[in-house]
Image (cartoon, rainbow, N blue to C red):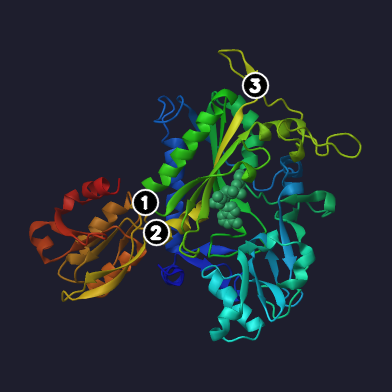
Amino acid sequence: MEMDKLVSLCKRRGFLFQSSEIYGGLNGFWDYGPLGVELKRNIKEAWWRDMVTGHDDIEAPPGAPEAYEMCGLDCTIIMHPQVWKVSGHYDLFVDKMVDCTESKKRYRYDQVPGRWVEAKGQKVFVTTLAEANHEQEIEARALKFFNLRAKDAADLGWQGGLVSLAKIDPAEYVKVLAPDAKALGTLTAPRDFNLMFKTIVGALGTEEDAAFLRPETAQGIFVNFKNVLDSSRVRVPFGIAQMGKSFRNEITPRNFTFRSREFEQMEIEFFCHPNSSLQWYQYWRDRRFRWYTEMGLSSERLQLREHHADELSHYSRGTADIEYAFPFLPAGEYGELEGVAHRGDFDLRSHMEGKLDPNSKPDLKVELGEDGKPKWKGSGKDLTYRDDITNERYLPHVIEPSAGADRATLAFLCEAYLEDQAPVEKGEMQTRVVMKLHPRIAPIKAAVFPLVKKDGMPEVAQKIYRELKKRWNVFYDEKGAVGRRYRRQDEAGTPFCITVDGQSLQDQTVTIRDRDTLKQWRVKVEEVTAELAERLK
Ligand code: GAP
């Protein structure tokens, strides 16, 4: 599937628009149109239902060490600034960026791939930002730089394969051809760039009132851990789920909604006893992977990737990414949909004692300032848990399955897009665009059509529409040829179309058409709701 076809369908049919488009858009911000908002809401609702409200607190699900409870939370986007100092985001949530003095563009240096090449006695590191066909793009740029023609490609002496600019010593930047530059050596040395958006709380507006838009929903859960324990009857092991907006001032937002500056996360912090934490980590990793396949992502495009020890964050004892082969990535590359991390007691301890020093691995000590006191003080509140059966008091370990609602939506859109052949009115075959979305997440569950706008058909169709509307998002359409109406619903991903025709007026039956198989069958009008309920399960 070519990405530009999906992007154009998303705009044409109202799944996704560029934010503030009439003013030229704002890079890294996206709006969901009438179909997109339903799709994303359905994905979030499916996650909440499957992880929280539909979860059986009494019996251990397959693969879980024991039964566990789940509850939800909805906390504010702006929190006490100390939260981010203690969590490490204030000091460490940075990307390295480089600026190009020629193009005036800014890049995240680990996202600029390039290759060393030598020609005419000069050695140059040629870079590109092209997502697909990196190698071809780099060759084309190298030929242009050395003033060579395509037939002279053999004169280029390549040294090594593709590497990220992050691996190049800044002292060698004089030999780097930046992605949008014509001259060499236009990049500045890498600098830290904090991804948190800063804002001012209150009328005084001084730096002391600075606060941050949350870059993740997770910290809201940790700082409410005690509140949840004290106000409900949950016992460890249990999980708290939260979904909502997060903000990151990404240096290079791109790939449609994949890397945005404002996005939604769906996160669970699961609290368990340290002794069983590895088993819980494995359980969540597998459970969350399965969820995507249950919702329709094909397992060939999905992979579970365990991080190597040197990739792990300073607090993590195990992390796995659930990744999807997005079509905008080069063949064989995957993009992260969700991370499942074993975070040990890092977060609860930090909020109790103060920011922990990442260099004091493995036992992690509170980071001290020049005065010998904690650099960023914790809350001082006791966040330990006492097991009222065994009387043991301990700091629970945390397993964190952290998903992105927008990335999941994008993956489901990519997976659903299909062009196939379907017959038009006179039986001849034509290419149709169909979004094969899982019925649970499809924006519209069914469309109801009168075959023609007369002979009492609209009245029957409207009655069915109103009946179905009590339970589902259903669409009524009486305009144009019925074949065209089917095609519009195929593009919207509507799984079923119900048509009232001449026969309906005689025997009170209607046809139901299946979006994927194109099969049509007749059902009694009074049985349409039950038939749909069965098929939309
Ligand atoms: N609390 C852990 C955490 O936030 P993360 O890997 O930084 O971990 C989790 O983010 C998920 O949030 C990612 O797997 C992705 O789905 C989503 N996400 C992160 N940054 C994003 C961005 N800039 N745009 C869209 N989604 C993003």
Write down the residue under mark 3: 394
* Residue in the image at 32% along x and 53% along y: 469
> Real-space Cα distance between discs 1 and 2?
8 Å
Q: Circle 3 — which element?
A: strand
Question: Which residue does the image show at 80% across and 37% down from the upper left?
Answer: 367
Q: Nearer the viewer, residue 294 or 35?
A: 294
- Depth check: 135 or 357 in front? 135
Say what amino acid the circle numbered 3 marks: Tyr
Side of 375 relative to 77 (left or right)? right
Tell which residue pokes out farthest to the top in this image. 390
Callout 1 amino acid? Gly
> Disc 1 or 3, which lies upstream in sequence?
1
Q: Position of residue 130 (x, y in %)?
A: 57, 71
Q: Which residue is mark 1?
A: 296
Q: Is residue 114 above or below residue 289?
A: below
Residue sitting at x 63%, y 62%: 163
Amino acid type indicated by mark 2: Glu
For the residue pair 484 and 294, the one nearer the viewer reads as 294
Tell me how far mark 1 sits from mark 3, CA to CA: 40 Å
> Of all residues shown, which one is farthest toward the left?
506
- Tell me the number on the disc at residue 415: 2
- Residue 202 x, y percent position in the rendering: 78, 51
**Foreground pick, 80 / 515:** 515
The reply to whether callout 1 and callout 2 are in contact (CB within 8 Å) is yes
CA separation, marks 3 and 2? 44 Å
